[in-house]
Amino acid sequence: MLIKIDNLTAPEVAQLLNEHLQDMYAISPPESVHALDLEKLRKPEITFWTVWDGNNLAGCGAIKQLANDHAEIKSMRTAHAYRGKGVAVKIMEHIMVVAGERNYQRLSLETGPQDFFTPARKLYERFGFEYCGPFGDYGEDPYSTFMTKSLI
């Protein structure tokens, strides 16, 4: 599998992110959906990667720089055909390496407390993330779970 920085122009990427947004809006009320659309993912403080298996899009993930020493994991998604095949682990490993190269001292994320998000929370726990309160511009929200990991 190949992980590469993506410019968010391929139709497969748009489709995967659209599925992601549809799921988020089906699970949480609109004011509690923090997933980013294509336009918001194109901001300069965000680096977006895709994972490819040949010509097939297997998944994606991103980091958003919040400060010189702190970034947020965003847009983690595995294509349905690749679930359970280690795609999320590969993108997390990649994000952790990049975070180290950029000298971030902390990575944080927002996910959901619902059962749908159990695999994601278990993945983040596996990578050493711990539960925490809101960070950045987030506030308390019953539809959000916050996690963070110190990298120092």
Image (cartoon, rainbow, N blue to C red):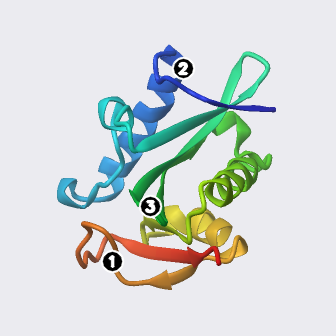
Residue positioned 44% across, 70% down in the render: 114
Mark 1 nearby-residue class (10 Å; few <14, some 14–19, many ≥20): some
Residue positioned 72% across, 27% down in the render: 52
Amino acid at circle 1: Pro
User: In the rendering, which numbered label is found on residue 68?
Assistant: 3
Toward the viewer: 117 or 126?
126
Label 3 element class: loop
Does the CB distance between marks 3 and 2 fall below 8 Å?
no
Label 2 sits on residue: 12
Mark 3 nearby-residue class (10 Å; few <14, some 14–19, many ≥20): few
Label 1 sits on residue: 134
Residue 78 at what x, y percent from top left?
62, 42
Does the CB distance between marks 2 and 1 fall below 8 Å?
no
Residue 49 as seen in the image, left or right of residue 30: right
Mark 3 or mark 2, whichever is nearer to me: 3
Residue 34 at what x, y percent from top left?
31, 54
Residue positioned 54% across, 20% down in the render: 12
Mark 2 nearby-residue class (10 Å; few <14, some 14–19, many ≥20): some
Whichever of callouts 2 and 1 sits on the residue coming sooner in the sequence is 2
How far apart marks 1 and 3 lie (CA) works out to: 19 Å
Quadrant in which the C terminus appears: bottom right
Whichever of callouts 1 and 3 sits on the residue coming sooner in the sequence is 3
Residue positioned 60% across, 54% down in the render: 102
Label 1 element class: loop
Residue 147 at what x, y percent from top left?
49, 75
How many numbered marks appear?
A: 3
Residue 103 at what x, y percent from top left?
60, 62
